[in-house]
Image (spheres, rainbow, N blue to C red):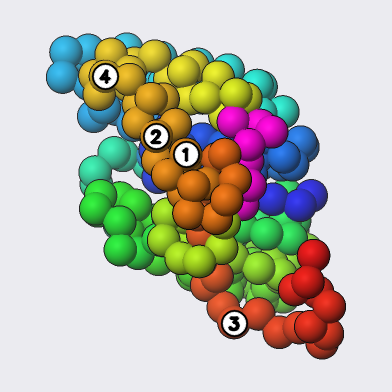
Amino acid sequence: MTLMVVGAHPDDAEIMAGGALAKSPGSAIVIVTKGELGSAHKPRDVLVEERKREAEEAAKILKAKLMMLGFEDSKLENSWEAALRIAYAIRLFRPKIVITHHPREYHPDHVTTYWLVRKALHIAGLPNAEVEGKPHTVKNVLLAGIGNIYLDISDVMDVKLEAIRRHKSQIEWLRDIASNVEVQNRFWGAKVGVRYAERFSLLRPMVIKELELLSH
């Protein structure tokens, strides 16, 4: 598998990396919390089921596998249990690339998810760690929304927006998030001369052996 995207809430993966997922069929989405606080009107139990269905529909559009860890929204802690669950996902899906939140994001769950992913990346590679599956080391980790790596998603932007629009509960609550994302990705694209782009930074330094790798 090429790619695994870890998001704090249902819809986060599609917003920050829906284009990357659309370009990588067969990838995985891991959602850490249930997103049960993402409404001003609906009861929690109703919203949990609704957001689960929405996430499943979006993953289907992106041709991605889906794993929902079920931790509580806005109560997420940098716990060993949560890190082990993400480490298991890494061992199960065996991605070459992981994308997650940048630590400078606004939502506490997003920041906590970043730290959980960092811990999980370490755990997943340890042979003696108490995690099911064979050890796995991820080649590269990308942090979404900040940085100087731009992925041209012009050819799959319509797929990304279709996936985001499956999260109807959030569109009802936060208005048209798809339109906001379209504007953001168009702005990033304009900065690098393409129609639409997603923006990332590398967690770890990249080593190259030939400058030719940067000439394409």
- Residue placed at 59% from the left, 82% from the top? 205
Identify the mark at residue 205; answer none if there is no mark: 3
Please report whichever mark, 2 or 4, sits nearer to the chain's N-terminal start. 4
Question: In screen coordinates, is 172 left or right of 149?
Answer: left
Task: Tell me the quarter of the picture where residue 62 sits.
Answer: top right
Q: Is residue 16 visible?
A: no
Q: Secondary structure at mark 1?
A: helix
Please report whichever mark, 3 or 4, sits nearer to the chain's N-terminal start. 4
Image coords of residue 89 (percent x, y): 63, 51
Question: In screen coordinates, is 90 left or right of 99?
Answer: right
Of residues 45 and 116, the one nearer the viewer is 116
Residue segment shown in magenta? 151-157
Identify the mark at residue 183; answer none if there is no mark: 2
Circles 2, 3 touching at the beta carbon (< 8 Å): no
Using a 10 Å C-alpha cutoff, classify the residue at mark 3 as few (fewer than 14 neighbours), some (14 to 19) or many (20 or more).
few
Please report whichever mark, 4 or 1, sits nearer to the chain's N-terminal start. 4
Of residues 187 and 141, the one nearer the viewer is 187
Kind of residue at badge 3: Pro
Circles 2, 4 touching at the beta carbon (< 8 Å): no
Question: Cα distance, mark 3 to mark 4?
Answer: 38 Å
Residue pointed to by mark 4: 175
Question: Cα distance, mark 4 to mark 1?
Answer: 19 Å
Kind of residue at badge 1: Arg
Residue pointed to by mark 1: 186
- Residue placed at 56% from the left, 78% from the top? 204
- Residue placed at 22% from the left, 12% from the top? 42
Image coords of residue 211 (percent x, y): 79, 83
Using a 10 Å C-alpha cutoff, classify the residue at mark 4 as few (fewer than 14 neighbours), some (14 to 19) or many (20 or more).
few
Image coords of residue 13 (percent x, y): 50, 40
